[in-house]
Image: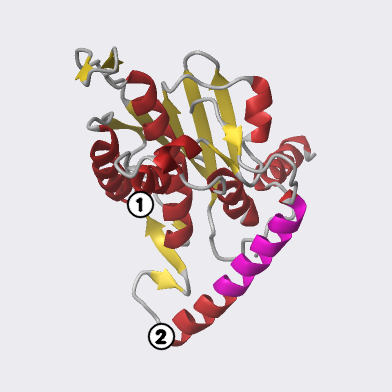
């Protein structure tokens, strides 16, 4: 991820928007689940897909994001997949797709903008093609979560910017591009978004007991950790307690039992 600005610095509507979007997510899940339960689909329980493969979702997204990035910048980093590539979980496919899409777009865009060939002296010539570092996607499966780690070399961000990144309306999109009809601004907006991607991703993850964490290394890059809770039968409908904490407490009670 790269350094950014806030489109509307005087407005702070985060709490209101959190409540608004949680209500919307809840209503949509209830309606879709009701419809799906009346029209059962193999491999699904309502809106939840059993044994969903995060790798397959990420591979489909990487193809589309790479195509879009190449259309805008002419180049794009390779996306490498590592770790437990066969891991699965029971989850809502649309939610996994949305969260992974937002995090992967940020990583690919930041890496491309930092390492793409530069124009020389404004004459339309470009420097020699640089070796663009890969974006690494690592998958791991724990007792409670599936962990998706997306690592880029897009330059990272200062600590203050890391805090602002979770605010609604925070974006890397540049208004200056709007003045140039040939700049590919509309496509760039499609890749960069409008400043709602990160907070909405965290909201979707936390709704079912997961979370999103950022570890930024200024001058180098950013690691994003997406934790998705297994939605097995009997799991709570929304997050009330951190499931990993509950698991640890249960294991500790078992160890300390006489």
Circle 2 sits on which residue? Answer: 39
Q: Earlier in the sequence, mark 2 or mark 1?
A: 2
Q: Within 10 Å of the Cα at label 2, are there few (<14), some (14-19), or many (20+) other Cα atoms? A: few
Percent from the top left, x then y, of residue 113? 37, 26
The answer to which image quadrant residue 161 occupies is top right
Main secondary structure found in the magenta portion: helix
Residue drawn at x 48%, y 28% is 1
Percent from the top left, x then y, of residue 89? 44, 53
- Range of magenta residues: 15-29
Tell me if residue 212 is in the magenta stretch: no
Residue drawn at x 52%, y 35% is 225
Q: Is residue 174 visible?
A: no
State the separation of the CA atoms marked 2 and 1. Answer: 23 Å
Is 232 placed left or right of 51 in the picture?
right
Q: Is residue 69 visible?
A: yes
Above-or-below relation of 163 to 92? above
Q: Nearer the viewer, residue 113 or 139?
A: 113
Percent from the top left, x then y, of residue 241? 74, 50
Cβ atoms at labels 2 and 1 below 8 Å apart: no
Percent from the top left, x then y, of residue 221? 47, 20
Q: Kindly state the secondary structure of the residue where label 1 is placed.
A: loop
Q: Nearer the viewer, residue 58 or 112?
A: 112
Quarter containing the C terminus: top right
Circle 1 sits on which residue? Answer: 53
Q: Nearer the viewer, residue 148 or 101?
A: 101
């Amino acid at each position: 991820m790269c350094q950014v600005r806030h489109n509307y610095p005087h407005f702070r509507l985060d709490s209101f928007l959190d409540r608004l979007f949680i209500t919307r997510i809840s209503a949509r899940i209830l309606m879709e689940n009701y419809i799906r339960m009346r029209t059962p689909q193999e491999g699904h329980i309502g809106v939840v897909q059993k044994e969903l493969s995060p790798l397959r979702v990420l591979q489909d997204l990487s193809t589309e994001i790479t195509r879009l990035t190449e259309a805008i910048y002419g180049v794009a980093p390779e996306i490498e997949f590592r770790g437990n590539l066969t891991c699965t979980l029971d989850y809502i496919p649309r939610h996994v797709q949305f969260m992974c899409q937002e995090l992967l777009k940020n990583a690919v865009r930041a890496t491309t903008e930092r390492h793409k060939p530069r124009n020389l002296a404004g004459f339309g010539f470009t420097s020699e093609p640089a070796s663009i570092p890969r974006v690494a996607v690592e998958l791991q499966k724990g007792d409670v979560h599936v962990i998706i780690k997306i690592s880029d070399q897009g330059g990272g961000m200062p600590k203050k910017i890391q805090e602002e990144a979770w605010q609604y309306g925070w974006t890397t999109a540049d208004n200056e591009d709007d003045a140039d009809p040939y700049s590919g601004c509309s496509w760039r907006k499609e890749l960069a978004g409008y400043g709602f991607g990160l907070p909405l991703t965290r909201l979707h993850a936390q709704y079912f007991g997961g979370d999103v964490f950022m570890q930024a290394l200024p001058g180098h890059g950013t690691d994003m950790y997406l934790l998705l809770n297994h939605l097995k039968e009997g799991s709570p409908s929304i997050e009330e307690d951190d499931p990993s904490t509950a698991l640890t407490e249960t294991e500790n009670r078992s160890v300390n039992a006489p």
